[in-house]
Amino acid sequence: MSLFWKKEAPAKVLFDAEKEEPVVHKSICTGETTVGFSDRATGRYRDVRKVMSASEIEAFCREIGVDPEKIRTIY
């Protein structure tokens, strides 16, 4: 038995492209950056994960099949 935890692969991110738009969310107060989805009808934000760099945002975009140039930033 290993003393170290095995790092699990992140769960596949699922979203409905007709109802949700992928976005980068930046906090004005803390500066924290997360990626997630904004509901097109209500504007409600659904957080997926915290990101620390542009490369992590690009990895998120590749994972969901979206061009990083087209992802919008909300505050």
Image (cartoon, helix red, strand yellow):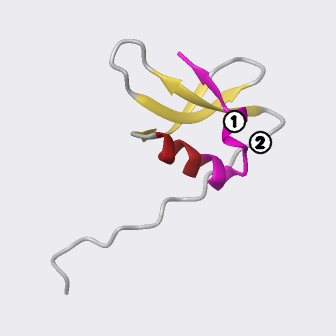
Q: Residue furthest right?
A: 18
Amino acid type at mark 2: Asp
Can you identify the residue that label 1 sits on?
69
Q: On the picture, is 53 further left or further right than 37?
A: left
**Image marks 1 and 2: residues in contact by CB distance under 8 Å:** no
Can you identify the residue that label 2 sits on?
16
**Circle 1: is it few (<14), some (14-19), or many (20+) Cα within 10 Å?**
few
Helix, strand or loop at mark 1 = helix
Q: On the picture, is 54 further left or further right than 65?
A: left
Q: Which residue is more in the foreground, 27 or 57?
A: 57
Q: Residue furthest top?
A: 29
- Say which residue appears at 47% left-offset and 22% top-offset: 26
Quarter of the image for residue 32 reads top left
**Of the residues under marks 1 and 2, which one precedes in the sequence?**
2
Return the x and y of residue 22 as percentages of the image width and height: 67, 35
Residue 28 sits inside the magenta stretch: no
Please tell me whether mark 1 or mark 2 is closer to you in this view: 1
Quadrant containing the N terminus is bottom left
Amino acid type at mark 1: Glu
Q: On the picture, is 12 further left or further right than 18?
A: left
- Say which residue appears at 19% left-offset and 82% top-offset: 2
Return the x and y of residue 53 as percentages of the image width and height: 43, 40
Helix, strand or loop at mark 2 = loop
Residue 70 sits inside the magenta stretch: yes
Question: Height in image: 60 above or below 44?
Answer: below
Question: Height in image: 4 above or below 20?
Answer: below
Residue range corresponding to the magenta coloring: 61-75
